[in-house]
Structures are given as structure tokens and as C-alpha cells.
Amino acid sequence: MKTNLFLILLVTTLSTSVFGQTDYFQGKRTYCEMPAGSETKKLFDLGMDCIKQNMYIGAANKIFQDLIKKDSSFCDAYFFAGYTFRLSNMNKEAVIMYYMADSLAQNKSIEFKQNLAVASMLVGNSKLSRKKFKEMTTYFPGNPEGYYGIALTSTLIGDFEYGLENIDKAEKIYNGHNDDSKFLKGVLLTLTGKHKESLEYYEKVRSRFSKDDNFNGNYALSLYEVAILNNDEKMLKTAKKHYQKVKDKSQLTDYLKSKFETQ
């Protein structure tokens, strides 16, 4: 599959975790010292209430921008300004704010690094995204998302073997409880020509992704390669069946299409 739609699908596992309602997203703590004054606390809480209720996001953004003007060292105001930009699909603006928050926090926040990494990926800055995912593995080695993110960026950068190394590390921490990581590993195995091994992973997630073009395209290719190698007509028919399930074949690589459209 071509990378863009693949990333849109698999970045959802990161988005779910980084935009989830942890205690930090409940406004129960900050990474940088909040500027003194009861008015500042009231404004911050009001902005957080808007986020928690998913209402008046533009107003919340202005609140956090105002807090930045009051104290340019308040990293959490930068972060939530970026977060509200992200909720408004203003990813380029979000990256700028996230970058400032992460720089000010001095490697104390996994939320800052992860949001910055995801937003950077969404705007096409795979170099910055990879850098922040690697920093996550350095400063938060017990969290699987950094390794998962490195593996995901490998589909953009092209270092697929390195991606496999990292998805293996993520899998161990997920302890087999993350279908997105299984799917990503299957795709990376396909991309590295390990087609037989990839089938095991596609089988594990078939019930969840059976209607997804990314799944059917990659699964079809690995089925095809294994079928040809083993002269397995039944598997070849299954490969063609999954290829036909791909609704938007324009997103398939020419290499993949050549395996089926010349049949």
C-alpha cells in the first residue's frame, strides 16, 4: 500500500493514547510551575473544562495563548494551546506549540513528546517525528508507544528492518494486547519480503481489519507470494479474493497491482 492512507489508519493507536483522558488531561497536574495568582488558575481550569467537554475549543485556545503571554516559560500552556489547535485540525500550528512545550519541559513529559511526534507525522515531518519517538524510548523505555512510533515512521523513511526491531520491542511491552501493532508488524514483514511470517499476523487481526483496504492489499500480496512459492492454487484464489476487496486500488503500489492485474 502507499504510505499516506496506511499512516492515517495506524496513527489512530497513537492518537487514542496521546489524546486519551489521563490524569494530566484532567488538569490535575502540570509539568511546569503555574504562574502565581488565583486568576491564572481560574483561566487554566476554564480552558481545561472546555477541552474535557469538547466545547468552545477556539476560546480555550485563546485562554492558553493568553497564559503564554503572561509567562512564556509555562510549558503546559504551550502544550494545551497546541492540543486545541490539534482538535481544530490545525496540525502545523499544533507542531509549533508542542515543540515549545517539549523544549521547556526538559524531557519530563511523555505526553509532550508523543503529541509532537504524532502531529509531526501528520504534517509530513517524518524526521522530527522519528526523533521524538526515539527520545520517548530513551526517557520512557517502559512505554511501548515510542517503539511503535519508530516502527510506524519506518514505513515513511524506508528502514523496514529497523522498524521490525522496534515493533518487536513494542509487542513485548503490549504483551500481545494491541491489534494495531500486530497489523503493523505484518505489513513490515511484507515490506521486508518475509511473506510467510506476515500471514500469521494478518490472521490474528483479520476479524478487525477485514474491510480495510490497507489490510486486504498487504495480505493479498503476502498470500500471493507464498502461494506462488508453494504452488498452492487454493491460497492463490484467497489472495485474489482479498485483492478484489480493495475498494480504492489507486492507493496500491504498481508492484502489488502487477501481481494481480496480469492474471
Image: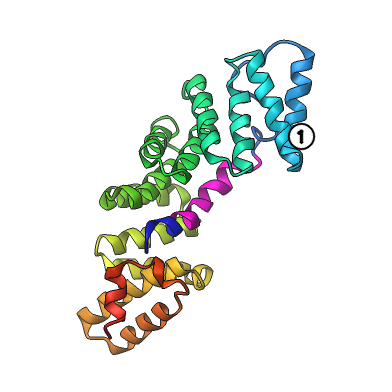
- The amino acid type of the residue labelled 1 equals Asp
Residue drawn at x 43%, y 29% is 139
Q: In the rendered view, tell whether residue 74 sits above or below residue 146.
A: above
Was residue 72 drawn as part of the magenta stretch in this picture?
no
Q: In the rendered view, tell whether residue 141 sits above or below residue 35.
A: below
**Can residue 248 be seen in this snapshot?**
yes
Query: Residue 230: x, y in percent?
Result: 22, 82
Query: Residue 136: x, y in percent?
Result: 43, 34
Query: Is residue 49 rendered to the left or right of residue 206?
Result: right
Q: Which residues are magenta?
A: 7-21
Given residues 226 and 44, the one toward you in this image is 44
Q: Quadrant of residue 218?
A: bottom left
Figure quadrant of the C terminus: bottom left
- Reading the image, the residue beneath label 1 is 49
Q: Residue furthest top?
A: 36
**Can residue 196 be seen in this snapshot?**
no
Query: Residue 108: x, y in percent?
Result: 50, 24
Query: Residue 71: x, y in percent?
Result: 63, 13
Query: Is residue 76 rendered to the left or right of residue 217?
Result: right
Q: Magenta stretch: dominant SS?
A: helix
Q: In the rendered view, tell whether residue 1 sits above or below residue 122.
A: below
Residue drawn at x 36%, y 75% is 220
